[in-house]
Amino acid sequence: MSVEKIILNGKIYTEDPRKPWVEAVAIQGKKIVYTGSNEGARQLASENTEVIDLGGRTVIPGLIDGHTHPTTVAKTFWRVRIPLTHDKDELFDNIRKALKKYPKEERPYFFCENYFAEVFGPNGPDKKELDALVSDRPARIQDFTDHACWYNSMALEMLTGEDGKPFSASPVGGAEFKKDENGEYTGWCHEAGADGDYGIYEKLGWKPPEVVDEEMIKPLLDFFRHYGIMCMMDGFTEGDENMKFFYELDKAGRLGMFYEATSILGQPEDLEASIARVREWQEKYTSEHVHCNTIKFFIDGTNEMGDCLSTQPFANDPTGTNYGSAFAEEEEVRDILVRLNEERIDLHVHTICDGAFRRMCNAVEAAQKICGDDWSIKVTLAHCEIIHPDDVHRVHELGIYIDWSTHWSGGYFGEEAQNYLGRERWDTMYDFTKIINAGEHVGFSSDVFSYQEAMRADPYFGMQVAMTRVDPLVPLDPDRYPGSVRPPASAKLDLKQLIHGYTMTNAIRMRLDHLIGSIEEGKLANMVVLENDIFEMPAEKISETEVAFTIFEGQVRDIKSNLSVQR
């Protein structure tokens, strides 16, 4: 037998435990037919075989982003972006500069990114301060977590309906507009959907794009392809038209990666509608690389804003009775799981604080008891920023998967969560070492939500932050945190753990491990060829990794990235 292509003289890290390192690969069509020595590969070649000499370059399997938002990012190009800062005066100055740069005629709705929650503290921002900056048009400044925002008075007025209440559509069932002690809306809002300000759009007679096209999303997809991301799961797929877009792009042969969609479940009572959406998408929009068999749900919000569920009372609550809140009761989640198991549909849950994590574990355990041997679905808990020590063992006992966004491992979210969790608990966050050491249930992702942070989807940047606990772009104060290292330093991950999470763990969770996730015989020939030997690089230099080229399903690709972020 002769093969179409052989790859020689590589330092190839396979993720195949039987042959973790090889120097050659043989490819026939889209699949790998041999891994091993140069000599073994040459024996499969003929005069018509294409030979690729890697010259000693390092190769890793094609990477998988386990949770990101491609269409959401693509649709944010129209927003105004300002530099990130932890200083309030500097934030206000940046907003003033942006207002001058983008007059009302150019940006009738001043939707600006971003502010850090800690700039305003636990009471949040107030519309009066934003009114002093911009009063000639509606304005919204986005919290950088994308789980809160800050409206001016004109925007609030446009969002207010006949019932006297402001409204913005939300993926969790409805935005929460905060009030002051006099019952007046402050302009601070939790969980307002990025595209949900319908009242503003209606009154302006203008709205941002709701559906992506290829021109809009190509810079982002090329960015993913360039760095070797060959599969991604959408954190929630934004409607039929965007699902159709990926399907048609794949049918035309221009997607060049796997796309795993998710159907949003805003509230427990919407479950049957979400299931029906999965079935409709499966029937209409399943292709070679586009699939949907997952529902996305939110169980709580963020630690920075305190709209999360904790196992202990919030540190800033003098009564010792405020444990936060969740979007569903344990019994409701249990029933969701039992129903999804009947349908064989997987569940992906935004899970932030340790109380929410415990609630999810309890619900999974209860559902498994009901389903017995019939239990078959995969449950992924995304984020899991803090896990109570008593619950760590439950990940493997219950077969739960965790998705963690690696670039969050440093100082990206600042210190605001200390208001609610206290410093002692804050120092234990983002630690997955015990879970990883016990098995392979932690996968990795970017969870980027806008062009403001799109560059952080670079997997090698994420790996560096997870290996060092230092965010080079948003470092913690080195006077308070030596070396800007985010505690606990013992939670640093190693490169092999990270590659495993970005490849095999994500492939298993997405039920694609028979096709991707490792370089081994019978699987698709998906590989990333690096200019640097990533295994020899210092941890603090991993983000400088350069990709020589990629191989997707046997085809060599040299895709350049021209993604840029406008400041």
Image (cartoon, rainbow, N blue to C red):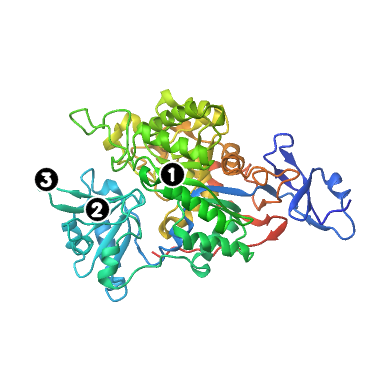
Q: Nearer the viewer, mark 3 or mark 1?
A: 3
Counting other residues with Cα less than 10 Å from the Cα at mark 1, is it few (<14), some (14-19), or many (20 or more)? many
Residue 191 pos. (x, y %): 31, 50
Q: Nearer the viewer, residue 217 or 94?
A: 217
- For residue 88, which numbered disc appears in the image? 2
**In-image side of 317 versus 561 (left or right):** left
Query: Which of the two discs, 3 and 1, labels the residue nearer the N terminus?
Result: 3
Q: Amino acid at mark 2?
A: Lys
Q: Which of the 4 image quarters holds residue 18?
A: top right
- Tell me how many marks there are: 3
Kindly tell me whether residue 427 is visible in this rendering.
no
Kindly tell me whether residue 480 is visible in this rendering.
yes
Query: Which of the two discs, 1 and 2, labels the residue nearer the N terminus?
Result: 2
Q: Amino acid at mark 3?
A: Glu
At x 52% / y 63%, what residue is drawn?
Answer: 245
Look at mark 3 in the image and give the residue it sits on.
181
Q: Is residue 379 above or below residue 473?
A: above
Q: Which residue sits furthest top?
A: 390
Q: Which of the 4 image quarters holds residue 95?
A: bottom left
Marks 3 and 2 sit apart, C-alpha to C-alpha, by 23 Å
At x 60% / y 48%, what residue is drawn?
Answer: 63
Q: Which residue sits furthest left?
A: 182
Marks 3 and 1 sit apart, C-alpha to C-alpha, by 34 Å
User: Which quarter shows the C terminus?
Assistant: bottom left
At x 86% / y 45%, what residue is drawn?
Answer: 39
Residue 62 pos. (x, y %): 64, 49
Q: Nearer the viewer, residue 368 or 444?
A: 368
Q: Nearer the viewer, mark 3 or mark 2?
A: 3
Look at mark 1 in the image and give the residue it sits on.
408
Q: Nearer the viewer, mark 1 or mark 2?
A: 1
Counting other residues with Cα less than 10 Å from the Cα at mark 3, is it few (<14), some (14-19), or many (20 or more)? few
Q: Nearer the viewer, residue 395 or 284?
A: 284
